[in-house]
Amino acid sequence: MNQNFMKYVFGICLLFPLFVRAQDCKLNRETDPYTKEKKISTGFTGLGRGSVTIDANAMEIDVFFSIEGIDKCFDYNSTAAIFFEGTKLKMLNRNGGSMNCEGLFHIIFRNTATTSSLLSKMTTQKINHIVFTGNNKKESTVTLSPANQEMLMVLANCLVTEAKTLIKQL
């Protein structure tokens, strides 16, 4: 009996990290009162010289950055180069939002049953830094601390997993 009890306790100890990680996933949920469309969001989280929120609905997943500072103008030709930890490769994305001079930058993905490669990479690899290039060719770098790297990866994974439940079945 004592040996079975030890196996039981050992099994619970092995599963404990899964339960702790699942508790980190706190998403904001809302339903549009007019269209009845469901939306989920991570809410804004600080990233050093900026902040990020990841929002999803049945059609798209929007990674929305707000970069601090003056003269941060972005248009459709503005880019964000994402550098992942442990590799020299970068992934380049165009701004998916409207033209603005408030430092707002959107990276938009379609919400589909299969996750795009960049979005998948964001959920499994830590981002070291992101270089935003505005319409005046001025660069703004947001460097993520180790805690921010982990937090962004966990939030992205959590939201992308949950976003698949929003896809409407045709």
Image: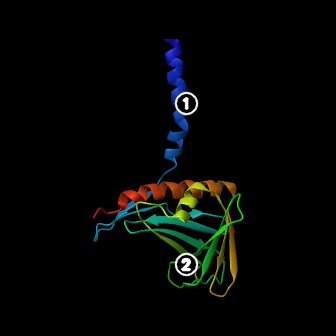
What residue sits right under mark 2 in the picture?
95
Q: Residue at x 53, y 58 (%)?
A: 156
How much space separates mark 1 and mark 2, taking CA atoms? Answer: 44 Å
Foreground pick, 99 / 82: 82
Return the x and y of residue 42 as percentages of the image width and height. Answer: 49, 60
Q: Residue at x 59, y 78 (%)?
A: 103
Color style of the picture: rainbow
Foreground pick, 26 / 126: 126
Return the x and y of residue 90 as percentages of the image width and height. Answer: 66, 68
> Helix, strand or loop at disc 2?
loop
Q: Residue at x 58, y 84 (%)?
A: 77
Foreground pick, 94 / 46: 94
Q: Quadrant of residue 163?
A: bottom left
Mark 1 vs 2, N-terminal side: 1
Q: Quadrant of residue 123?
A: bottom right
Q: Residue at x 56, y 76 (%)?
A: 105
Q: Can you name the residue that lies furthest to the bottom here? A: 136
**Image vertical order of residue 9 relative to residue 129, above or below:** above
Q: Quadrant of residue 33?
A: bottom left
> Helix, strand or loop at disc 1?
helix
The three-letter code of the residue at mark 2 reads Asn
Label 1 crowd (10 A; few <14 / some 14-19 / many >=20): few
What residue sits right under mark 1 in the picture?
13
Residue 101 relative to residue 108: left or right: right
The three-letter code of the residue at mark 1 reads Cys
Return the x and y of residue 66 as percentages of the image width and height. Answer: 58, 72
